[in-house]
Amino acid sequence: MAVSKILISKNPIFDKCPKCKEWDSLHRSRARSLGENIIKMIPLWNIFRCKACGWRGYRFTFTFTTESLKVISLYIVLIFIAASIVRFALSYFIK
């Protein structure tokens, strides 16, 4: 059985700028405040700046694939089924 990854790492440097829609113009930026330092510690977000228009903001560094969405939906269904079974068992034995 093949193992499927839920999140795939991507490099936002090659994405479009959210403001000017220019391709390949983003680069990593330094944190300027305590709040940005805290956000920078979270491995899912990074701070970027656009070379073309000067936009500065946060970008998500991971992406979901169609296969990962299938796996996530399967896990949600399994959790719902398991919770229903546990609820039924508890209501049957504890009255």
Image: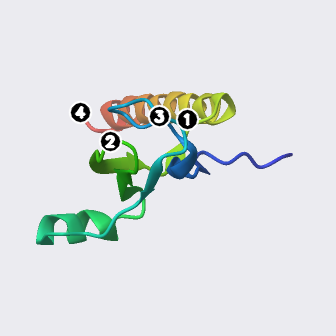
| Residue located 48% across and 46% down the image | 25
Kind of residue at badge 1? Ile
- Mark 3 and 2 residues: CB-CB less than 8 Å, in contact? yes
Q: Which mark is residue 31?
A: none
Tell me how far mark 3 sits from mark 4, CA to CA.
Answer: 64 Å
- Name the residue carrying label 4: 95
Q: Nearer the viewer, residue 49 or 11?
A: 49
Q: Residues within 10 Å of mark 1 (few under 14, many from 20)?
A: some
Kind of residue at badge 4? Lys
User: In terms of secondary structure, where does tag 1 sit?
Assistant: helix
Q: Nearer the viewer, mark 3 or mark 4?
A: 3
Q: Nearer the viewer, mark 1 or mark 3?
A: 3
Which residue reaches farthest front? 52
Q: Residues within 10 Å of mark 4 (few under 14, many from 20)?
A: few
Q: Nearer the viewer, mark 2 or mark 4?
A: 2
Sequence-first tag of 1 and 2: 2
Q: Which mark is residue 72?
A: 1
Tell me how far mark 3 sits from mark 2, CA to CA.
Answer: 9 Å
Kind of residue at badge 2? Cys
Tell me how far mark 1 sits from mark 3, CA to CA.
Answer: 33 Å
Residue 13, horizontal then vertical, whole percent: 52, 51
Residue 90, horizontal then vertical, whole percent: 34, 37
- Name the residue carrying label 2: 53
Sequence-first tag of 1 and 4: 1
User: In terms of secondary structure, where does tag 3 sit?
Assistant: loop
- Name the residue carrying label 3: 22
How many numbered marks are there? 4
Sequence-first tag of 3 and 4: 3
Residue 84, horizontal then vertical, whole percent: 42, 28
Where is 36 relative to 93, above or below?
below
Kind of residue at badge 3? Glu
